[in-house]
Image (cartoon, rainbow, N blue to C red):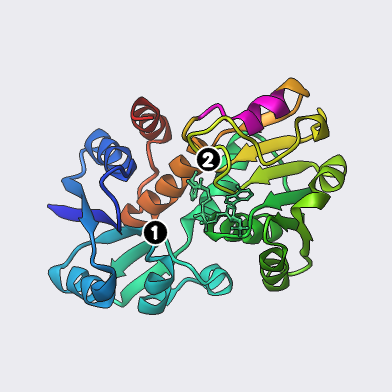
């Protein structure tokens, strides 16, 4: 039996186990997907232990995405992002991927949204924002990063080729020119707030929210009311898992089965 897992702290509420187990079961792959709540002071030992035990692959979540980057041989695009959320333990050693970044791009593709040549606004400058900003840039968008703590927006924008950094006060002006507006802050998480002013939305853009609890956030509701296309945070969660699954197994992931498993747990 193959063993895969998610490593983080905390991990007890992770949706990765049902997401991946549904795919393994559907394809008849003899594998189990388990959770590992690691001690932050012993994370390097935990990664080495997983490798020594012959664990086949790991999803990495907070707060270990940077530790994972230090442990693996990063796949090329990951070198720029500096964070790893997927480890594939291969015969040549652990390889690191960032499927938060590649998975988000697949979520946009799934919704027939072309990013090349667009103006994309990323709200936030933490881990999710980093994955989105690098992903959008790689897909050919012009990226503007806006954040409550403006200095962090400038720091992130400096790392992403061609990106600009802004304070949150500039968000309405940025939205007026935007084709894509992505919330990568925790505003709206289990609350009815939005980081974006309702009257700044227009119908000629796509709104993406990384927040997936609730699925129908105020951010997306305001965007939809203005006529914008919306993509909820479960699509990012789904496709980061789809990309990880395909990297580990070399099989096409059963996307519909995984989507159903995920949404039934939300
Ligand atoms: P993080 O690194 O802690 O970053 C949090 C961001 O939110 C920072 O930019 C912070 O701004 C901003 N923020 C927090 N409270 C705010 C407020 N009241 N007003 C304005 N900005 C505020 O977190 P993260 O890991 O990037 O996660 C961000 C969100 O994305 C979370 O809700 C998480 O659940 C979600 N997420 C979803 C997926 C998915 O697969 N769908 C994946 C990863 C994360 P400051 O810098 O000013 O503090």
Q: Does label 1 point to a residue whose CB lies under 8 Å from ligand 1?
A: yes
Q: Is residue 176 above or below residue 218?
A: below
Q: Earlier in the sequence, mark 2 or mark 1?
A: 1
Asked whether residue 189 appears in the rendered view, the answer is: yes
The residue at 51%/29% (across/down) is 215
Residue under circle 2? 211
Across and down, in percent, residue 19 comes to: 33, 39
Disc 2 is placed on an element classified as loop
Q: Quadrant of residue 92?
A: bottom left
Across and down, in percent, residue 191 comes to: 52, 33
Q: Is residue 8 above or below residue 200?
A: below
State yes or no: residue 266 in magenta.
no
Q: Does label 2 point to a residue whose CB lies under 8 Å from ligand 1?
A: yes
Q: Which residues are magenta?
A: 215-224
The residue at 79%/67% (across/down) is 162
Q: Nearer the viewer, residue 134 or 77?
A: 134
Residue under circle 1? 62
SS majority, magenta:
helix
CB-based contact (under 8 Å), mark 2 and mark 1: no
Q: How many marks?
A: 2
Q: Is residue 131 left or right of residue 116?
A: left
Q: Is residue 177 above or below residue 111?
A: below
Asked whether residue 116 appears in the rendered view, the answer is: no
């Amino acid at each position: 039996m193959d063993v895969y897992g998610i490593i983080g702290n905390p991990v007890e509420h992770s949706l990765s186990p049902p997401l991946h187990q549904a795919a393994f079961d559907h394809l008849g792959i003899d594998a189990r997907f388990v959770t590992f709540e690691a001690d932050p002071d012993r994370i390097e030992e935990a990664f080495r232990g997983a490798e020594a035990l012959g664990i086949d692959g790991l999803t990495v979540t907070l707060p270990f995405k940077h530790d994972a980057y230090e442990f693996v041989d990063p796949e090329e695009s990951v070198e720029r992002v500096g964070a790893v959320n997927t480890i594939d333990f291969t015969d040549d050693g652990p390889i690191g991927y960032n499927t938060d970044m590649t998975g988000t791009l697949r979520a946009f593709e799934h919704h027939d949204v072309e990013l090349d040549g667009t103006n994309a606004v990323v709200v936030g400058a933490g881990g999710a924002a980093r994955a989105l900003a690098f992903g959008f840039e790689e897909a050919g968008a012009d990226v503007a990063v806006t954040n409550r703590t403006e200095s962090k927006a400038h720091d992130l924008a400096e790392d992403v080729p061609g990106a600009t950094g802004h304070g949150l006060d500039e968000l309405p002006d940025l939205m007026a020119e935007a084709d894509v507006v992505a919330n990568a802050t925790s505003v709206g998480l289990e609350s009815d707030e939005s980081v974006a002013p309702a009257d700044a939305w227009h119908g000629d853009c796509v709104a993406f929210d990384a927040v997936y609890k609730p699925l129908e956030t105020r951010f997306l509701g305001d965007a939809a009311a203005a006529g914008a296309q919306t993509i909820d945070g479960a699509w990012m969660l789904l496709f980061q898992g789809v990309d990880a699954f395909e990297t580990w197994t070399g099989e096409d992931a059963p996307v519909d089965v995984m989507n159903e498993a995920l949404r039934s747990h939300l």
